[in-house]
Image (spheres, rainbow, N blue to C red):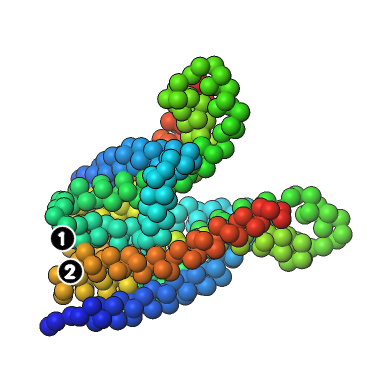
Amino acid sequence: MEFTFWDIARNLLTGLEWTLALSLVAFICGGVVGLLVMLARIAPVRWLRILAYSYIELFQGTPLLMQLFIVFFGVALLGTEVSAWLAAAAALTLFTSAFLAEIWRGCVESVSRGQWEASECLAMTRLETLRYVVLPQALRIAVAPTVGFSVQVVKGTAVTSIIGFTELTKTGSMLANATFEPFMVYGLVALGYFALCYPLSRAAYHLERRLNVTA
Amino acid sequence: MAYEMDFGPVLANTDVLLQGAMFTLGLTAIGTLLGVGLGIAGALVRAWRIRPFNYLFGLYVELIRNTPFIVQLFFIFFGLPALGLRLNEWEAAVLAMVINLGAYSTEIIRAGVQAVPPGQIEAASALAMTRMEIFRHVVLRPALAKVWPALSSQIIIVMLGSAVCSQISTEELTFAANFIQSRNFRAFETYLATTLLYLAMAILIRQLLGWIGRRYVVGAR
């Protein structure tokens, strides 16, 4: 079967859509879980803090590929077949949540202790303090590093090609094998990732600078 | 029927796993030495705006930091032979790691180099130090000391990322794990044990780099 350049580009674009979809799912679900982990990480309860710390250490200290394998083969042990798409989304969610939790913890802790104490003097509860005093300020600091980390999420999705999820990299591998033109195909694949990641990197850079000026 | 965990078949292959771990550490060591070396050169060129190399390094840094490691690896291993550059799986893995770490460490070290106050460099040249001496003692040392934690984290990320080198059949730790689980069909147990091994290696490297930092970079004169 003959592949024209247009065929290759069209297939890669479909792969790119899946990469984008997986990135969005991982980032949104990872954000929700990450928020919970971050709250546990700064909780007044000691064992919760230790649990959250171990969670973060575990996912930051092991390869994403291993996390994927464990989810992929681990869920299968429970007797249910898991699709590559689900395993990829679940593993990337865990991975993303650990990193975001740690990034956001730093942001929350950069809000000065005096703010907590002042809120306590005003008889605000811990949750009220978080909701009305600390998080609004931490949010501003968190925007730039969060956007910056989204680049790592997009790049992380490439590893899911190994468990057979047909995103951009997997599509590229199949096309490279079919067309015997790995140089061009992987070049285009790299270009696809660059098109997704470069705007995010630039945005993170500009947000960081803007924040430094006003802060 | 509940699944019964059995780590026996995995533990029987401890030697294979440990050998894989050794190769991963070896890859990381070579990748780190060459990658950080490239990063120092890149940081110098970028911070002091040595044309035209600063533009080239800028392009290189952006290209590498905005594409996944696995695509860089595949491009080197499968793509470059089209240009007549045929590398075996080890050479490709090392080259990919060096190029990847080189880009990140260029940016990390550059931040440290730019944080050195210009007055300090002027003071050094007033003391008749040569450019090379100034670079070594006045710029590089304090710059590395400043960014040592960030650099250490990046080295660990590169070590963990090297797991995908198994895909081009570089026989490192993940390759060893794939080999074991393909023979004992205990995929979950094998990958769990491997994951813990990676975690131990990450902690070990962090401790080691912390020690090197305190002994030779941050605290040293």
Residue lying farthest right? A122
Q: How many marks?
A: 2
Residue A54 visible? The answer is yes
- Residue beneath the point at 76% across and 62% down: A133
Q: Is residue B209 above or below residue A56?
A: above
Tell me where residue B204 appears, x and y as whole percent: 39, 40
Q: Which residue is mark 2?
A: A181
**Circle 2/circle 1 CB separation < 8 Å:** yes
- Residue beneath the point at 36% across and 61% down: B68
Tell me where residue A214 appears, x and y as whole percent: 71, 55
Residue A166 placement, left or right of B147: left
Residue A61 visible? The answer is no
Provide the secondary structure element on which disc 1 rests: helix
Q: Which residue is mark 1?
A: B82
Q: Is residue A176 above or below residue B199?
A: below
Q: In the image, which disc is placed on residue A22? A: none
